[in-house]
Image (spheres, rainbow, N blue to C red):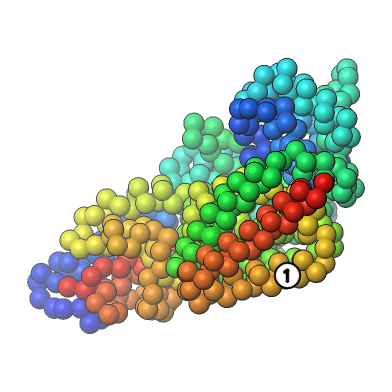
């Protein structure tokens, strides 16, 4: 595939500064998740160490440690010399073991907090969309829900699932909620592969999405919010249950 | 000046004139953006016709010839924050889909948009359902899409103006320009605030694109009137205490309290 650079919301979020604290972990998580989700393409060259460290807001020492961890996970290869650098090495499909390892990097409390943030975003988006949506706006959400049913593997399902929540925020006519949702999906998207591989759950999610769309269409903002929140809380609860099962 | 059921008399006539002046100025501002779209459309159609005359299919590298014109329009046209040509899938020989798209950032620097359009890795690879693509393709006419949150290209609340690019009657894609809503509102607000009552600009589907009415802000819906019909007729009308004045040439309706 060679060098190819792409942009857009989800991509920009990948290279936004990481929080302070466990910085190595944060960098590994951010880049690793982006690779699992296919936001960074196989063979793509990562920016140079200094540039990447600058973009992520970490020291080059921190970045090197993170790259080392990513190399150990087989997600990045580093070539020396002319034309060298760090390159993305995408797995064919997200590997369950590696994803479980990634889930272990989150404490149950962090997952709960992530779910709270997500519920706030998607719940508010559903509420506002119910007030501001005219029928035509729902076409994309309907299409996405149908696509989720046909998505073959967990990674594809996770991308389409994330798109539903991004489109819901866009239907709310809020650029800020949409940007936040894009950023949140880059954090949680890879983890969701762990639960979306299950066909039965995928059907359940599609049903939940359909009921959110119906409530939005009816202008029932309170129930639209509640249904969207329930959908998000359920996904988070499944992740937390998986995390605690280890 | 055409009128329907508005009150008569000298005062009302002056007010009507003020409203129609605002509607005309809004139309004029967007007409300037359509000029950028038309220039891009002409450049692209000429380029693609030239390539066809050479007996080959166009490739992405051919589109580099559009860049000087695109850069010029981005720097010259104040309202335009993104401009380019979006190819219909299958038109280019080297890629399945492509946006030759350039944006100006907050510092005024011009840079290309590079999207991941590989359906194997991106959930956003199919752009053919977006209004700015589908409307010109399906109607053969220029269109204004939005206001909408553009999570594909800019992450901004936007209007996108577009027109079909055709060679020999075949649809090859769209030429388009983005106007961020905050820039449009900044241009429209002084005009709207010059009118005596709360005024807003509404699209064909009832979505507010700019507003001087604190009770109905941009992004909200005005329910009730058939704005599409008002635009179709090209004439002012009234609906439940609202006066509706179409902006000439562009699909926006000025909505004010009926006097």
Label 1 SS: helix
Query: Is B250 positioned to the left or the right of B13 in the image?
Result: right
Residue visible at 66% across and 34% down? A15
Tally the marks: 1
Residue A110 vs A154, above or below: the answer is above
Residue A21 location (% of width, % of height)? 63, 27
Residue visible at 46% across and 39% down? B76
Query: Is A163 positioned to the left or the right of B26 in the image?
Result: right
Q: Which of the two residues, B103 or B126, is positioned nearer the viewer here?
A: B126
Q: Residues within 10 Å of mark 1 (few under 14, many from 20)?
A: few
Residue visible at 63% across and 67% down? A141
Residue visible at 63% across and 58% down? A233
Q: Which of the two residues, A20 or A92, is positioned nearer the viewer here?
A: A20
Query: Is A66 positioned to the left or the right of A126 in the image?
Result: right
Quadrant the N terminus of chain A occupies:
top right
Say which residue label 1 marks: A204
Residue A146 location (% of width, % of height)? 72, 71
Residue B99 location (% of width, % of height)? 68, 50
Instruction: Using the image, name the chain to which the residue with label 1 belongs.
Output: A
Residue A229 vs B240, above or below: the answer is above
Residue B26 location (% of width, % of height)? 35, 57
Q: Can you see residue B216? A: yes
């Amino acid at each position: 595939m060679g060098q190819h650079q792409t942009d857009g919301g989800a991509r920009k979020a990948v290279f936004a500064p990481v929080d302070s604290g466990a910085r190595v972990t944060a960098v590994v998580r951010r880049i690793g998740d982006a690779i699992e989700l296919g936001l960074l393409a196989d063979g793509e060259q990562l920016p140079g160490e200094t540039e990447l460290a600058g973009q992520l807001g970490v020291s080059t020492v921190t970045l090197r440690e993170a790259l080392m961890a990513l190399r150990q996970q087989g997600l990045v290869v580093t070539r020396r010399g002319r034309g060298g650098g760090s390159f993305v090495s995408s797995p064919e499909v997200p590997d369950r073991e590696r994803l479980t390892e990634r889930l272990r990097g989150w404490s149950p409390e962090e997952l709960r907090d992530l779910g709270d943030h997500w519920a706030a975003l998607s719940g508010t988006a559903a509420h506002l969309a119910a007030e501001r949506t005219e029928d035509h706006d729902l076409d994309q959400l309907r299409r996405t829900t149908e696509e989720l049913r046909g998505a073959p593997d967990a990674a594809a399902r996770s991308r389409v699932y994330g798109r539903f929540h991004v489109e819901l925020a866009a239907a709310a006519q809020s650029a800020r909620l949409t940007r936040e949702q894009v950023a949140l999906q880059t954090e949680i998207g890879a983890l969701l592969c762990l639960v979306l591989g299950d066909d039965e759950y995928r059907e359940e999610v599609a049903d939940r999405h359909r009921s959110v769309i119906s409530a939005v269409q009816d202008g029932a903002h309170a129930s639209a919010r509640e249904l969207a929140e329930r959908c998000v809380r359920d996904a988070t609860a499944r992740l937390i249950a998986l995390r605690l099962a280890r | 000046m055409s009128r329907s059921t508005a009150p008569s008399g000298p005062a009302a006539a002056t007010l009507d004139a003020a409203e129609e002046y605002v509607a005309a100025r809004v139309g004029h501002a967007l007409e300037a953006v359509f000029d950028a779209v038309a220039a891009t459309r002409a450049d692209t159609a000429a380029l693609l016709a030239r390539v066809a005359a050479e007996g080959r299919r166009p490739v992405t590298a051919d589109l580099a010839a559009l860049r000087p014109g695109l850069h010029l329009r981005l720097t010259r046209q104040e309202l335009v924050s993104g401009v380019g040509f979006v190819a219909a899938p299958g038109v280019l020989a080297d890629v399945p889909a492509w946006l030759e798209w350039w944006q100006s950032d907050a510092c005024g620097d011009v840079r290309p948009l590079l999207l991941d359009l590989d359906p194997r890795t991106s959930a956003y690879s199919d752009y053919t359902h977006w209004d700015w693509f589908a409307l010109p393709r399906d109607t053969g006419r220029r269109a204004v899409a939005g206001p909408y949150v553009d999570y594909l290209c800019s992450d901004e609340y936007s209007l996108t103006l577009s027109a079909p690019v055709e060679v020999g009657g075949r649809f090859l894609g769209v030429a388009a320009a983005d106007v961020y809503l905050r820039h449009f509102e900044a241009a429209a607000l002084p005009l709207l605030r010059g009118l005596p009552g709360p005024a807003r600009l509404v699209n064909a589907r009832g979505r507010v694109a700019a507003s001087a009415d604190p009770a109905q802000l941009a992004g909200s819906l005005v329910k009730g009137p058939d704005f599409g019909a008002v635009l179709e007729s090209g004439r002012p009308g009234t609906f439940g205490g609202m006066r509706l004045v179409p902006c000439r040439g562009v699909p926006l309706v000025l909505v004010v309290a009926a006097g």
